Amino acid sequence: MRGTPLRSDFDASKVRAAAPSLKDAGQTRRLLALAEIYDGASRTQAARTGGVTLQIIRDWVVKFNSFGPQGLIDKKPPGQPPLLNGEHLAALAAVVESGPNPVVHGVVRWRIVDLRQWLYDQFQVSVSDQTLSRVLRAMNYRRLSARPRHHAQAEGPIEGFKKVSRRVWRKSVAKRASVPPT
């Protein structure tokens, strides 16, 4: 037998017995391909059974030898680590909650671009508008915009100019019982 030998603590019957009870279809397929090798089939035949190439069969054998059947489970790839860590998120939440100081920050309300600049000034972390928007949304912040109001606007006179609609419903008048014609 050429190639890396399979573990000796398993055999074809143990591998086939474990395969149907698994929830991961990919893991089951991989185990059945390795059972072919345990039965004495060539790696090429096992590759046909698994629907993969010889290199992938070798990778499965290495994972199976190292971790057993659990090594054949599809795992989510780790991906890129997030740009903003816990410290950044806590500081961002504090700054959003406290609101901008017009004298210090130069703005009267936070926009995404202002928060991006603040993050860069504080932590030298550069994030895109889309990423920052997604992070703020995940932190349960929503883009809210108040209705514009003039700074010198008085509350009292406005009420006098509001239009009041008439009631659209009226109490119905009691109808007299109709007398059938004779």
Image (cartoon, rainbow, N blue to C red):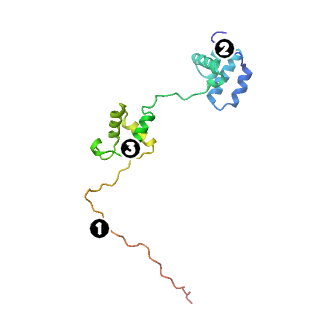
Residue contact between numbered discs 3 and 2, judged by CB atoms under 8 Å: no
Q: Which residue lies most toward the top here?
A: 2
Q: Is residue 118 left or right of residue 45?
A: left
In this rendering, the label closer to the viewer, 3 or 1: 3
Q: Residue sitting at 37 percent across and 46 percent down?
A: 98
Q: Amino acid at mark 3?
A: Val
In this rendering, the label closer to the viewer, 1 or 2: 1
Say which quarter of the image contains residue 157: bottom left
Identify the disc placed on residue 96: 3
Q: Which residue lies most toward the left here?
A: 152
Identify the disc placed on residue 6: none
Q: Amino acid at mark 2?
A: Ser
Residue contact between numbered discs 3 and 1, judged by CB atoms under 8 Å: no
Which of the pair 1/23 is nearer the observer?
Answer: 23
Q: Which residue lies most toward the right here?
A: 13
Q: Residue sitting at 37 percent across and 32 percent down?
A: 123
In the rendering, at what x and y percent does residue 49 appear?
A: 64, 21
Residue pointed to by mark 2? 42
- Identify the secondary structure beneath mark 1: helix
Q: Count numbered badges in the picture.
A: 3
**Measured Cα–Cα span from mark 3 to mark 2:** 63 Å
In the rendering, at what x and y percent does residue 35 appear?
A: 69, 20
Which of the pair 15/162 is nearer the observer?
Answer: 162
Residue 74 to residue 150: above or below: above
Q: Residue sitting at 73 percent across and 26 percent down?
A: 17
In this rendering, the label closer to the viewer, 3 or 2: 3
Identify the disc placed on residue 161: 1
**Measured Cα–Cα span from mark 1 to mark 2:** 90 Å
